[in-house]
Image (spheres, rainbow, N blue to C red):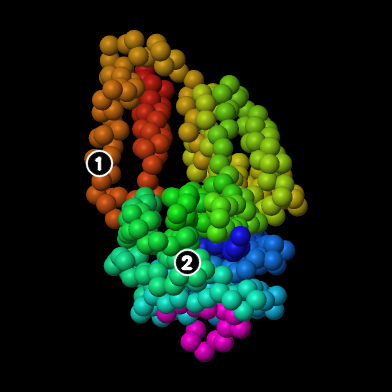
Amino acid sequence: MTAFRFIHCSDLHIDSPFKGLASQVPSLTERLRESTFRSFHNIVKLAVEEKVDAVLIAGDIFDGADRSLQAQLKFRRGLLELSEKGIPSFIVHGNHDPSNSWSHTLDWPEGTTIFPGNKVERFPVTQDGKPIAWIYGISYPQKEVNENLALKFRKDQDQGFAVGLLHANVGQQPGHDNYAPCSLQDLISSEFDYWALGHVHEFKVLHENNPCVVYSGNTQARHLKETGPKGCCLVTLNSGAPANIRFVPTDVVSYRSANVDISGASSINEVLRAIQSQVEELAKESSTHEGLVVRLILKGRTTIHNEIQNTEATKALADEVQAFFEGHSPWVLVDLSTQTASTYDIDSLKEGKDFVADLLGLCEDDKNKQLESKIQEAMKPVFESWAGRKYLAADEDIEDITLKARNLALDQLVNRQDP
Protein backbone atom coordinates (compact mmCIF):
# COMPACT_ATOMS: atom_id res chain seq x y z
CA MET A 1 0.00 0.00 0.00
CA THR A 2 1.41 3.39 -1.04
CA ALA A 3 1.35 6.18 1.53
CA PHE A 4 2.11 9.90 1.35
CA ARG A 5 2.71 11.69 4.69
CA PHE A 6 2.87 15.45 4.83
CA ILE A 7 2.18 18.50 6.96
CA HIS A 8 -0.47 20.95 5.83
CA CYS A 9 -0.33 24.40 7.40
CA SER A 10 -1.36 27.93 6.50
CA ASP A 11 -1.79 31.50 7.73
CA LEU A 12 1.48 31.75 9.65
CA HIS A 13 1.33 35.58 9.66
CA ILE A 14 4.98 35.73 10.69
CA ASP A 15 6.02 39.03 12.29
CA SER A 16 2.45 40.12 12.97
CA PRO A 17 2.68 43.37 14.99
CA PHE A 18 -0.05 42.62 17.61
CA LYS A 19 -0.66 46.38 17.76
CA GLY A 20 -3.57 46.45 20.23
CA LEU A 21 -2.23 43.83 22.65
CA ALA A 22 1.36 45.00 22.53
CA SER A 23 0.37 48.50 23.63
CA GLN A 24 -1.19 47.16 26.84
CA VAL A 25 2.03 45.67 28.21
CA PRO A 26 5.03 46.91 26.16
CA SER A 27 7.38 44.48 27.93
CA LEU A 28 5.59 41.60 26.17
CA THR A 29 5.73 43.14 22.69
CA GLU A 30 8.70 41.11 21.49
CA ARG A 31 7.35 37.85 22.93
CA LEU A 32 4.05 38.35 21.11
CA ARG A 33 5.81 39.22 17.88
CA GLU A 34 8.08 36.18 18.13
CA SER A 35 5.16 33.80 18.77
CA THR A 36 4.23 33.49 15.08
CA PHE A 37 7.76 32.50 14.10
CA ARG A 38 8.07 30.15 17.10
CA SER A 39 4.92 28.34 15.99
CA PHE A 40 6.44 27.82 12.53
CA HIS A 41 9.58 26.49 14.20
CA ASN A 42 7.34 23.96 15.96
CA ILE A 43 6.01 22.86 12.57
CA VAL A 44 9.54 22.40 11.24
CA LYS A 45 10.43 20.40 14.35
CA LEU A 46 7.33 18.21 13.91
CA ALA A 47 8.14 17.60 10.24
CA VAL A 48 11.66 16.45 11.12
CA GLU A 49 10.52 14.24 14.02
CA GLU A 50 7.76 12.61 11.94
CA LYS A 51 10.02 12.29 8.87
CA VAL A 52 7.25 13.51 6.58
CA ASP A 53 7.53 13.47 2.82
CA ALA A 54 6.70 17.16 2.40
CA VAL A 55 5.45 20.37 4.04
CA LEU A 56 2.62 22.27 2.31
CA ILE A 57 1.94 25.93 3.20
CA ALA A 58 -1.34 27.36 1.93
CA GLY A 59 -0.65 31.10 1.96
CA ASP A 60 -0.44 34.14 4.24
CA ILE A 61 3.03 33.33 5.50
CA PHE A 62 3.53 37.03 6.24
CA ASP A 63 1.23 39.80 7.37
CA GLY A 64 0.94 41.99 4.30
CA ALA A 65 2.08 45.56 4.79
CA ASP A 66 3.79 44.56 8.04
CA ARG A 67 5.95 41.99 6.29
CA SER A 68 9.66 42.75 6.48
CA LEU A 69 12.92 41.36 5.13
CA GLN A 70 13.65 40.16 8.66
CA ALA A 71 10.42 38.12 8.61
CA GLN A 72 11.34 36.59 5.26
CA LEU A 73 14.80 35.65 6.54
CA LYS A 74 13.27 34.00 9.61
CA PHE A 75 10.94 32.01 7.37
CA ARG A 76 13.82 31.06 5.09
CA ARG A 77 15.70 29.75 8.14
CA GLY A 78 12.93 27.22 8.79
CA LEU A 79 12.79 26.16 5.14
CA LEU A 80 16.54 25.68 5.14
CA GLU A 81 16.28 23.28 8.09
CA LEU A 82 13.66 21.28 6.18
CA SER A 83 15.86 21.26 3.09
CA GLU A 84 18.86 19.99 5.04
CA LYS A 85 16.71 17.07 6.26
CA GLY A 86 15.60 16.26 2.72
CA ILE A 87 12.01 17.47 3.24
CA PRO A 88 10.65 19.52 0.32
CA SER A 89 8.32 22.46 0.95
CA PHE A 90 5.55 23.77 -1.31
CA ILE A 91 4.18 27.29 -0.91
CA VAL A 92 1.43 29.47 -2.37
CA HIS A 93 0.97 33.20 -1.73
CA GLY A 94 -2.29 34.44 -0.21
CA ASN A 95 -4.02 37.80 0.11
CA HIS A 96 -1.74 38.97 2.97
CA ASP A 97 1.47 38.03 1.17
CA PRO A 98 0.84 38.25 -2.60
CA SER A 99 3.70 37.62 -5.01
CA ASN A 100 4.31 41.31 -5.59
CA SER A 101 5.10 41.90 -1.88
CA TRP A 102 7.97 39.40 -1.51
CA SER A 103 11.65 40.14 -2.01
CA HIS A 104 12.63 39.13 -5.54
CA THR A 105 16.35 38.94 -4.75
CA LEU A 106 16.17 36.48 -1.86
CA ASP A 107 17.27 32.96 -2.78
CA TRP A 108 15.20 30.17 -1.28
CA PRO A 109 16.66 26.83 -0.13
CA GLU A 110 16.90 23.82 -2.39
CA GLY A 111 13.70 21.82 -2.28
CA THR A 112 11.50 24.91 -1.78
CA THR A 113 8.83 25.37 -4.46
CA ILE A 114 6.88 28.63 -4.64
CA PHE A 115 3.98 28.49 -7.07
CA PRO A 116 3.50 31.27 -9.65
CA GLY A 117 0.50 33.59 -9.75
CA ASN A 118 -0.34 33.38 -13.45
CA LYS A 119 -1.32 29.71 -13.75
CA VAL A 120 -1.68 26.40 -11.88
CA GLU A 121 1.46 24.32 -11.98
CA ARG A 122 2.28 20.88 -10.55
CA PHE A 123 5.45 19.48 -9.02
CA PRO A 124 6.27 15.93 -7.86
CA VAL A 125 7.18 14.53 -4.48
CA THR A 126 9.42 11.52 -5.02
CA GLN A 127 10.40 8.43 -3.08
CA ASP A 128 13.27 6.29 -4.34
CA GLY A 129 13.24 8.30 -7.55
CA LYS A 130 9.56 7.70 -8.27
CA PRO A 131 6.70 10.23 -7.84
CA ILE A 132 4.38 9.32 -4.97
CA ALA A 133 2.40 12.56 -5.18
CA TRP A 134 1.92 15.68 -7.30
CA ILE A 135 1.32 19.05 -5.67
CA TYR A 136 -0.76 21.49 -7.70
CA GLY A 137 -0.93 25.15 -6.75
CA ILE A 138 -1.38 28.78 -7.73
CA SER A 139 -0.44 31.97 -5.85
CA TYR A 140 -2.11 35.36 -5.52
CA PRO A 141 -0.28 37.82 -7.81
CA GLN A 142 -1.87 40.72 -5.89
CA LYS A 143 -3.89 41.12 -2.68
CA GLU A 144 -7.41 40.98 -4.09
CA VAL A 145 -8.20 37.91 -6.17
CA ASN A 146 -11.91 37.65 -6.92
CA GLU A 147 -11.95 34.91 -9.57
CA ASN A 148 -12.62 31.24 -8.85
CA LEU A 149 -9.09 29.79 -8.87
CA ALA A 150 -10.37 26.28 -8.14
CA LEU A 151 -11.69 26.02 -11.69
CA LYS A 152 -8.13 26.37 -13.00
CA PHE A 153 -7.05 23.07 -11.39
CA ARG A 154 -7.00 20.03 -13.70
CA LYS A 155 -5.63 16.68 -12.67
CA ASP A 156 -3.35 15.52 -15.49
CA GLN A 157 -1.42 12.60 -14.02
CA ASP A 158 -2.30 8.94 -13.37
CA GLN A 159 0.42 7.85 -10.94
CA GLY A 160 0.64 9.19 -7.39
CA PHE A 161 -1.69 11.22 -5.22
CA ALA A 162 -3.01 14.58 -6.43
CA VAL A 163 -2.98 17.38 -3.85
CA GLY A 164 -4.32 20.90 -4.47
CA LEU A 165 -2.74 23.81 -2.57
CA LEU A 166 -5.11 26.77 -2.52
CA HIS A 167 -5.79 29.96 -0.54
CA ALA A 168 -9.53 30.54 -0.92
CA ASN A 169 -12.91 31.07 0.65
CA VAL A 170 -14.85 27.85 0.08
CA GLY A 171 -18.61 28.15 0.39
CA GLN A 172 -18.51 31.76 1.64
CA GLN A 173 -17.05 30.99 5.03
CA PRO A 174 -18.24 33.76 7.42
CA GLY A 175 -15.81 36.23 8.95
CA HIS A 176 -13.32 36.13 6.07
CA ASP A 177 -12.93 38.15 2.88
CA ASN A 178 -14.46 36.36 -0.08
CA TYR A 179 -11.20 36.00 -2.02
CA ALA A 180 -10.83 33.30 -4.69
CA PRO A 181 -14.41 32.20 -3.95
CA CYS A 182 -15.44 28.68 -4.90
CA SER A 183 -17.94 26.04 -3.88
CA LEU A 184 -17.23 22.78 -2.09
CA GLN A 185 -18.57 20.99 -5.16
CA ASP A 186 -15.91 22.70 -7.31
CA LEU A 187 -13.28 20.90 -5.22
CA ILE A 188 -15.08 17.57 -4.83
CA SER A 189 -15.53 17.21 -8.60
CA SER A 190 -11.81 17.72 -9.27
CA GLU A 191 -10.78 14.07 -8.74
CA PHE A 192 -7.98 15.21 -6.41
CA ASP A 193 -7.13 13.26 -3.27
CA TYR A 194 -6.63 16.18 -0.90
CA TRP A 195 -7.21 19.94 -0.91
CA ALA A 196 -4.84 21.81 1.42
CA LEU A 197 -6.65 25.08 2.04
CA GLY A 198 -5.65 28.37 3.61
CA HIS A 199 -7.43 31.64 4.50
CA VAL A 200 -9.84 30.50 7.25
CA HIS A 201 -8.24 30.73 10.72
CA GLU A 202 -9.90 27.62 12.12
CA PHE A 203 -9.26 23.90 11.66
CA LYS A 204 -12.15 22.58 9.55
CA VAL A 205 -12.66 19.37 7.60
CA LEU A 206 -15.16 20.32 4.91
CA HIS A 207 -15.08 16.85 3.26
CA GLU A 208 -13.59 13.75 4.90
CA ASN A 209 -12.55 11.64 1.91
CA ASN A 210 -12.46 11.35 -1.87
CA PRO A 211 -11.30 14.08 -1.72
CA CYS A 212 -10.34 15.41 1.69
CA VAL A 213 -11.06 19.15 1.79
CA VAL A 214 -9.38 20.72 4.80
CA TYR A 215 -8.62 24.08 6.37
CA SER A 216 -5.68 23.66 8.74
CA GLY A 217 -6.40 27.04 10.38
CA ASN A 218 -3.75 29.52 11.46
CA THR A 219 -0.71 28.31 13.37
CA GLN A 220 -0.77 30.97 16.11
CA ALA A 221 -3.69 33.11 17.29
CA ARG A 222 -3.10 36.85 17.05
CA HIS A 223 -6.09 38.38 18.84
CA LEU A 224 -8.76 37.56 21.41
CA LYS A 225 -11.37 36.45 18.89
CA GLU A 226 -9.09 33.52 17.93
CA THR A 227 -9.41 31.40 21.04
CA GLY A 228 -8.64 27.70 21.26
CA PRO A 229 -5.70 25.65 19.96
CA LYS A 230 -4.01 26.63 16.70
CA GLY A 231 -1.69 24.43 14.66
CA CYS A 232 -1.28 22.27 11.57
CA CYS A 233 -2.48 18.99 10.08
CA LEU A 234 -0.35 15.85 9.98
CA VAL A 235 -1.81 13.94 7.04
CA THR A 236 -1.34 10.43 5.67
CA LEU A 237 -2.91 9.56 2.34
CA ASN A 238 -3.19 5.82 1.71
CA SER A 239 -3.81 4.13 -1.62
CA GLY A 240 -5.98 1.40 -0.09
CA ALA A 241 -7.52 3.05 2.98
CA PRO A 242 -9.13 6.31 4.12
CA ALA A 243 -6.89 9.28 4.78
CA ASN A 244 -5.68 9.98 8.30
CA ILE A 245 -5.83 13.66 9.30
CA ARG A 246 -4.48 14.62 12.73
CA PHE A 247 -4.58 18.17 14.02
CA VAL A 248 -1.41 19.05 15.96
CA PRO A 249 -1.28 22.25 18.07
CA THR A 250 1.79 24.40 17.39
CA ASP A 251 0.90 27.70 19.12
CA VAL A 252 3.18 29.05 21.83
CA VAL A 253 0.74 31.65 23.19
CA SER A 254 -2.73 30.51 24.25
CA TYR A 255 -5.70 32.84 23.83
CA ARG A 256 -8.61 32.25 26.20
CA SER A 257 -11.77 34.02 27.35
CA ALA A 258 -13.85 33.54 30.48
CA ASN A 259 -16.53 35.15 32.60
CA VAL A 260 -15.80 36.03 36.23
CA ASP A 261 -18.89 35.99 38.44
CA ILE A 262 -18.56 38.65 41.14
CA SER A 263 -22.18 38.46 42.30
CA GLY A 264 -22.37 39.62 45.89
CA ALA A 265 -18.86 41.10 45.94
CA SER A 266 -18.79 44.08 48.30
CA SER A 267 -15.16 45.19 47.94
CA ILE A 268 -12.42 45.65 45.34
CA ASN A 269 -10.35 43.05 47.21
CA GLU A 270 -13.02 40.42 46.58
CA VAL A 271 -13.11 41.30 42.89
CA LEU A 272 -9.31 41.00 42.63
CA ARG A 273 -9.34 37.60 44.34
CA ALA A 274 -12.01 36.34 41.92
CA ILE A 275 -10.01 37.55 38.90
CA GLN A 276 -6.75 36.08 40.18
CA SER A 277 -8.41 32.74 40.86
CA GLN A 278 -9.81 32.58 37.31
CA VAL A 279 -6.43 33.47 35.75
CA GLU A 280 -4.65 30.83 37.87
CA GLU A 281 -7.10 28.19 36.62
CA LEU A 282 -6.60 29.20 32.98
CA ALA A 283 -2.81 29.31 33.45
CA LYS A 284 -2.85 25.71 34.70
CA GLU A 285 -4.80 24.65 31.61
CA SER A 286 -2.23 26.48 29.44
CA SER A 287 0.85 25.17 31.24
CA THR A 288 2.36 23.81 28.00
CA HIS A 289 2.37 27.29 26.44
CA GLU A 290 4.89 30.07 26.93
CA GLY A 291 2.22 32.74 27.33
CA LEU A 292 -1.47 33.21 28.09
CA VAL A 293 -3.56 36.08 26.75
CA VAL A 294 -6.93 36.09 28.47
CA ARG A 295 -10.06 38.16 28.06
CA LEU A 296 -12.05 38.32 31.29
CA ILE A 297 -15.57 39.74 31.58
CA LEU A 298 -16.81 40.65 35.05
CA LYS A 299 -20.47 39.68 35.48
CA GLY A 300 -23.10 39.56 38.19
CA ARG A 301 -25.01 41.95 40.46
CA THR A 302 -22.86 43.71 43.00
CA THR A 303 -23.01 46.72 45.30
CA ILE A 304 -19.76 48.04 43.81
CA HIS A 305 -21.12 47.98 40.26
CA ASN A 306 -20.84 51.76 39.82
CA GLU A 307 -17.35 51.81 41.30
CA ILE A 308 -15.88 49.52 38.62
CA GLN A 309 -17.72 50.83 35.54
CA ASN A 310 -15.33 53.51 34.35
CA THR A 311 -12.31 52.80 32.12
CA GLU A 312 -9.85 54.02 34.75
CA ALA A 313 -11.11 51.50 37.31
CA THR A 314 -11.02 48.61 34.84
CA LYS A 315 -7.46 49.48 33.83
CA ALA A 316 -6.38 49.71 37.47
CA LEU A 317 -7.79 46.24 38.16
CA ALA A 318 -6.09 44.79 35.07
CA ASP A 319 -2.76 46.41 36.01
CA GLU A 320 -2.97 44.99 39.54
CA VAL A 321 -3.65 41.48 38.24
CA GLN A 322 -0.84 41.90 35.71
CA ALA A 323 1.56 42.84 38.54
CA PHE A 324 0.40 39.85 40.60
CA PHE A 325 1.36 37.43 37.78
CA GLU A 326 4.65 39.11 36.87
CA GLY A 327 7.35 36.46 36.43
CA HIS A 328 4.72 33.71 36.21
CA SER A 329 5.11 30.79 33.81
CA PRO A 330 3.32 30.95 31.44
CA TRP A 331 3.49 34.74 31.31
CA VAL A 332 0.07 36.37 31.46
CA LEU A 333 -1.59 39.28 29.64
CA VAL A 334 -5.07 40.27 30.86
CA ASP A 335 -7.79 42.13 28.96
CA LEU A 336 -10.60 43.11 31.35
CA SER A 337 -14.10 44.42 30.76
CA THR A 338 -17.29 44.67 32.83
CA GLN A 339 -20.88 43.59 32.26
CA THR A 340 -22.02 43.79 35.86
CA ALA A 341 -25.31 45.14 37.18
CA SER A 342 -26.36 46.95 40.30
CA THR A 343 -28.27 45.20 43.08
CA TYR A 344 -31.74 46.49 42.28
CA ASP A 345 -34.58 43.92 42.35
CA ILE A 346 -35.32 43.17 38.70
CA ASP A 347 -38.48 41.18 39.47
CA SER A 348 -39.98 44.00 41.51
CA LEU A 349 -39.12 46.56 38.85
CA LYS A 350 -40.81 44.45 36.17
CA GLU A 351 -44.06 44.45 38.16
CA GLY A 352 -44.25 48.24 38.12
CA LYS A 353 -46.49 50.37 35.89
CA ASP A 354 -43.84 52.81 34.75
CA PHE A 355 -41.27 53.36 32.02
CA VAL A 356 -38.70 51.14 33.82
CA ALA A 357 -41.10 48.17 33.72
CA ASP A 358 -41.76 48.80 30.01
CA LEU A 359 -38.01 48.92 29.32
CA LEU A 360 -37.40 45.61 31.11
CA GLY A 361 -40.27 44.01 29.21
CA LEU A 362 -38.79 45.18 25.93
CA CYS A 363 -35.32 43.85 26.83
CA GLU A 364 -36.65 40.41 27.78
CA ASP A 365 -39.05 39.93 24.89
CA ASP A 366 -37.62 36.64 23.59
CA LYS A 367 -40.27 36.22 20.93
CA ASN A 368 -39.93 39.49 19.04
CA LYS A 369 -36.42 40.55 20.02
CA GLN A 370 -37.60 44.12 19.47
CA LEU A 371 -34.72 45.90 21.18
CA GLU A 372 -32.05 43.76 19.52
CA SER A 373 -33.62 44.46 16.13
CA LYS A 374 -33.61 48.18 16.84
CA ILE A 375 -29.96 48.06 17.95
CA GLN A 376 -28.98 46.18 14.80
CA GLU A 377 -30.86 48.69 12.65
CA ALA A 378 -29.26 51.67 14.42
CA MET A 379 -25.78 50.17 14.05
CA LYS A 380 -26.23 49.04 10.46
CA PRO A 381 -24.56 52.10 8.85
CA VAL A 382 -21.53 51.64 11.11
CA PHE A 383 -21.07 47.95 10.39
CA GLU A 384 -21.87 47.74 6.68
CA SER A 385 -18.17 47.67 5.79
CA TRP A 386 -15.88 44.66 6.40
CA ALA A 387 -13.81 46.70 8.83
CA GLY A 388 -16.86 47.00 11.05
CA ARG A 389 -18.25 43.50 10.63
CA LYS A 390 -15.10 41.82 11.87
CA TYR A 391 -15.63 43.47 15.27
CA LEU A 392 -19.29 42.47 15.50
CA ALA A 393 -19.98 39.22 13.69
CA ALA A 394 -21.89 37.01 16.12
CA ASP A 395 -25.44 37.13 17.51
CA GLU A 396 -24.14 36.89 21.05
CA ASP A 397 -22.36 40.23 20.57
CA ILE A 398 -25.73 41.89 19.96
CA GLU A 399 -27.11 40.15 23.05
CA ASP A 400 -24.20 41.46 25.13
CA ILE A 401 -24.76 44.97 23.83
CA THR A 402 -28.47 44.72 24.64
CA LEU A 403 -27.74 43.59 28.19
CA LYS A 404 -25.18 46.32 28.72
CA ALA A 405 -27.58 48.93 27.33
CA ARG A 406 -30.30 47.71 29.69
CA ASN A 407 -28.02 47.88 32.73
CA LEU A 408 -26.73 51.35 31.84
CA ALA A 409 -30.31 52.58 31.46
CA LEU A 410 -31.33 51.07 34.81
CA ASP A 411 -28.33 52.67 36.50
CA GLN A 412 -29.47 56.06 35.28
CA LEU A 413 -33.19 55.55 35.83
CA VAL A 414 -33.41 53.52 39.05
CA ASN A 415 -30.42 54.64 41.05
CA ARG A 416 -31.19 58.30 40.39
CA GLN A 417 -34.90 58.24 41.09
CA ASP A 418 -36.04 60.44 43.91
CA PRO A 419 -37.12 58.54 47.03
Q: CA distance from mark 1 to mark 2?
A: 50 Å
The secondary structure that dominates the magenta segment is loop
Mark 1 Cα-neighbour bin, 10 Å: few <14, some 14–19, many ≥20: few
Q: Which mark is residue 419?
A: none
In the image, what residue occupies the spot 39% across and 30% down? 403
Residue 320 placement: quadrant: top right
Q: Residue 268's spot in the image, x, y percent?
A: 62, 32
Please, is residue 228 above or below residue 169 in the view? above
Q: Label 2 sits on what residue type?
A: Ala
Residue 259 position by quadrant: top right
Question: Residue drawn at (69%, 79%), measured in percent from left and top?
Answer: 84
Q: Residue 330 versus residue 305: which sits nearer the camera?
A: 330
Mark 1 secondary-structure assignment = helix
In front: mark 1 or mark 2?
2
* Quadrant of the frame with the C terminus: top left
**Mark 1 lies on residue:** 378
Identify the amino acid type marked 1: Ala
At which x and y percent is residue 283? 69, 43
Give how far across and how far down residue 418 sits, in percent: 36, 18
Quadrant housing residue 395: top left
Quarter of the image with the N terminus in it: bottom right
Q: Tell me if residue 311 can be seen.
A: yes
Which residue is identified by label 2?
162
Is 102 on the left or on the right of 34, as rendered?
left
The span shown in magenta is: 103-116
Q: How packed is label 2: few (under 14 Cα within 10 Å), some, or many (20 or more)?
A: many
Q: Is residue 58 magenta?
A: no
